């Protein structure tokens, strides 16, 4: 099994329900574009704004190497699903969708089955997907991280196949580290990402699994990102709060580019 799935690192910026103003969203994009443009040889960047800002951000990104994604979607293409957005509606200007983020699992009650259906719908519609997995703090304290993550990966990828591997990304986000400022020890992250790769290999085959990228997420910032992207089995990071600060995210891109530029 190779150390990395790709030569480029993937940095995914999840803005969550921020900012509340569309103008601020555009300003944020323009603030990070120079750093991202300078790092295109070694870093792939995807931005994930809230639904209302997708079109405005897409217009700013037009002609650039920066990709765009949605933070969620529904598994049906159309129908009587008030308030939902289908992947078919997103593929006109998005390249990515995040599914199964812990905030949706914990706060909104999403199940592994729902995540699996969403992931399959995203892939069927020609988009790339980031499937989030991760244990709660109680699980971590009880030494059940491997058990929980293994179960989530198996269930969430139930409808995926080897043909989807190049557009499939798994983000390991320990729930206790998200937005807490308490990032996971790199050794724990490494062991868990190694486990994820092994489980994916069992599910879709070793050859296809080599194309699947695995990210770390959870209180990633410019000060600690190097400790993750330098890990042999880490293909990049899913960045939350730090991606809302143009200067901070620009530093994350720069640090990641430097690490990958020396591989």
Image: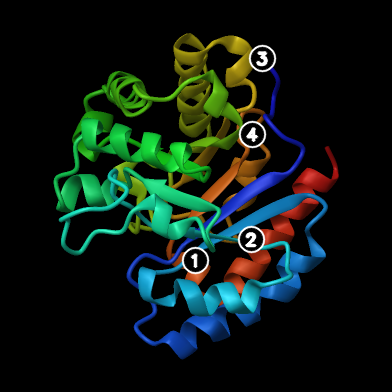
Q: Where is residue 198 in the image (x, y as percent from the top left)?
A: 50, 14
State how far apart marks 2 and 1 are (Cα).
Answer: 9 Å
Q: In this view, does 191 lie to the left or right of 251?
A: left
In the image, 60 versus 241, the foreground residue is 60
Q: How many neighbours does mark 2 have within 10 angstroms: few (below 14), some (14-19), or many (20 or more)?
A: many
Q: Is 236 placed left or right of 152 in the picture?
A: right
Q: Relative to residue 31, is residue 70 depicted above or below?
A: above
Q: Name the residue under label 4.
A: 231
Q: Which colour scheme is used?
A: rainbow
Badge 4 marks a residue whose secondary structure is: loop
Q: Can residue 57 be seen in this view?
A: yes
For disc 1, the marked residue is 242
Say whether disc 2 or disc 3 marks the residue closer to the N-terminus: 3
Quickly name the residue at label 3: 1
Q: In this view of the protein, which residue sits in the foreground, 39 or 86?
A: 86
Instruction: Assess whether mark 1 and mark 2 are in contact (beta carbons under 8 angstroms).
Output: yes
């Amino acid at each position: 099994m190779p150390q990395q799935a790709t030569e480029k690192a993937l940095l995914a910026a999840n803005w969550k329900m921020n900012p509340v103003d569309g103008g601020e969203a555009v300003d944020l994009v323009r603030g990070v574009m120079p750093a991202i443009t300078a790092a295109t040889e070694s870093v792939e960047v995807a931005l994930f704004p809230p639904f209302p800002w997708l079109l405005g951000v897409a217009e700013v990104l037009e002609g650039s190497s920066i990709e765009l994604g949605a933070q969620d979607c529904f598994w049906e293409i159309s129908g009587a699903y008030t308030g939902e957005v289908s992947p078919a509606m997103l593929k006109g200007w998005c390249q990515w969708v995040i599914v199964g983020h812990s905030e949706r699992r914990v706060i909104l009650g999403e199940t592994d089955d729902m995540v699996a259906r969403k992931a399959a719908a995203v892939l069927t519609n020609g988009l790339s997907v980031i499937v989030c997995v991760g244990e709660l703090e109680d699980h971590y304290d009880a030494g059940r991280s491997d058990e929980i993550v293994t179960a989530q990966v198996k269930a969430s990828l139930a409808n995926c196949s080897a043909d989807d591997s190049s557009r499939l990304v798994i983000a390991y986000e320990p729930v206790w580290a998200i937005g807490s400022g308490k990032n996971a020890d790199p050794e724990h992250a490494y062991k868990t990402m190694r486990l994820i790769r092994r489980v994916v290999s069992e599910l879709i085959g070793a050859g296809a699994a080599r194309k699947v990228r695995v990210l770390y997420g959870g209180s990633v910032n410019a000060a600690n990102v190097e400790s993750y992207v330098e890990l042999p089995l880490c293909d990049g990071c899913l960045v939350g709060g730090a991606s809302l600060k143009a200067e901070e995210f620009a530093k994350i891109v720069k640090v990641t580019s430097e690490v990958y530029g020396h591989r």
